[in-house]
Amino acid sequence: MATNFSTHKMTNIIDNNLLIRLKGSNINEPVQELYKNYFESVVYYLKGQGCNEEDGADIFQESILVFIEQVQQDKFRGDSSIKTYITGIARNLYMNELRSKGRRANREEFYAKDNFSEVEESVQHRMYSNENSKKLMQLFEEIGDPCKKILSGYYFENMPMKKLLLLTNYDNEQVLRNKKAKCMKHLKDLITTSKEITELFKTYLTYAQ
Amino acid sequence: MPSNIQTEIALDDFLSGAINRHRLNEIMNMNGVNETDLALEEHHTAIHVVRQYNIMKQVQNVHTDFFKKTVQPEKAPAKVISMPPRVFVMRIAAGLIIILAGFTMVQYFGSTGTGFYKSLHNSYSVTENRSGTENKSELVEAFKKGDHTTVISLYNQISNPGNRELFFAGNAYLETGSTSKAIELMQQILAHNKTSGELLYQDEAEYYLAMGYLKNNETDKALPILTGIANEPAHTYHNKVSRITLLKMKWLGHK
């Protein structure tokens, strides 16, 4: 009993540490841990529901993106284990996948096995679908590398202008600020011209608020 | 939606809590932006795109690495072959001679500018086209299809080409063997950026200018550019320029 308690406590400490690191800007290592610890079991679960291995791997990747967001928005409260939580996300994503592809036969089989009365369709899941992820990434790629570097540094890594100046080859902070403003304008123009992305984010931000 | 530096800074300041909504409205009005709510929504969305991109990129990298490691087949255990010690030593010596001869040949034949060009050059690939005008769009589409002749033809119809058109046309010239023209266009991008303070296609133009020089056997001109790229970890093409190649260039007298 004492051993179980200390193991549980240790797991919690490790999980908390992972969650803290997922809130930072460099999430490579914690994501690697998520892959190492949960990929196999989640894909195994999905395969048991009729999903093939390739789709299972894609769904796992999407699940990780959803999970990171839940953690960053403090929506994951640790009521269940990380494994259970990610498996739950993967299950919902797989249901969405079945619905969108209209694989009725597979869906009926899935319902029969797990007796889910209703499928939860989340906006977040739509945001992280492979297709939409690719669109969003391509859109951002289009602003060019210098702009990517500046906007990522400022808005994602929360770098102060002084530090960002050291990483770029601009003469002073004012020139860098001007460049940042131009980059944002360029990005906003691209978003506005892409109806799909605009719509996606409109729904998503409404949901997230 | 008009946008300038003041409004951009004001939007950032508002989101960070440095100014209140009243002050934001004032700044927006002063700069001719009447719809503050819309401006805020657009700003918020753009920031989300930046964040999502960075998260997705990192997860995608881990995903790819994970598969590389797990999918790689395990190497079959090496066979244990017993042989007399003298034969074993002679075989090792013969192997070393072959490796040395091969290395010397590679150095000899690869020491020209074009040799370095072949080892360093990667054709530019474009992922997506969302250019503003029809003409620009056609140009990028043609480039994506590898139709360099059309790219050059479309470029020649543009009266005032921007960095993007210069860059794609420059690459098309590079691919079709008109190296001097490619060099000229890459130089134009860098000159424009130097005077305007912009950085559009800066890293790309530097790298492909160096490639142009190498293809033209002007290694002495390519070397300082490539050294600069190798010295700047944040440069887009930093990983493509190995220090070993640079050393080879220097050792082989291309100073």
Image (tube, coloured by chain):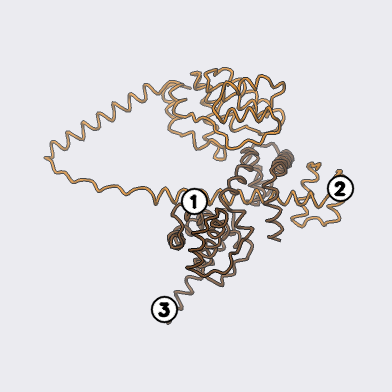
Q: Nearer the viewer, mark 3 or mark 2?
A: 2
Mark 2–mark 1 Cα distance, whole angstroms, equals 44 Å
The reply to whether residue B20 is in sight is yes
| Percent position of residue B251, x then y | 42, 25
Q: Identify which amino acid the numbered label 3 is placed on.
A: Thr
View extreme (front): residue: A105
How many numbered discs?
3
In the picture provided, is B200 more to the left or to the right than A96?
Answer: right
Identify which amino acid the numbered label 2 is placed on: Asn
Which three-letter amino acid code belongs to the residue tagged 1?
Val
Mark 2 or mark 1, earlier in chain: 2
Element class at badge 3: helix
Please name the color used to draw chain B. orange
Which quadrant of the figure has residue B158? Answer: top right
Give SS at disc 2. Answer: loop
Could you tell me which residue is drawn at 58 percent across and 48 percent down? A131
Residue picked out by circle 1 = B62
Residue B77 in percent (x, y) is at 25, 48
Q: Which chain is brown in the rendering?
A: A
State the separation of the CA atoms marked 3 and 1: 34 Å
| Residue sticking out furthest to the left | B84
Residue bearing the label numbered 2: B34
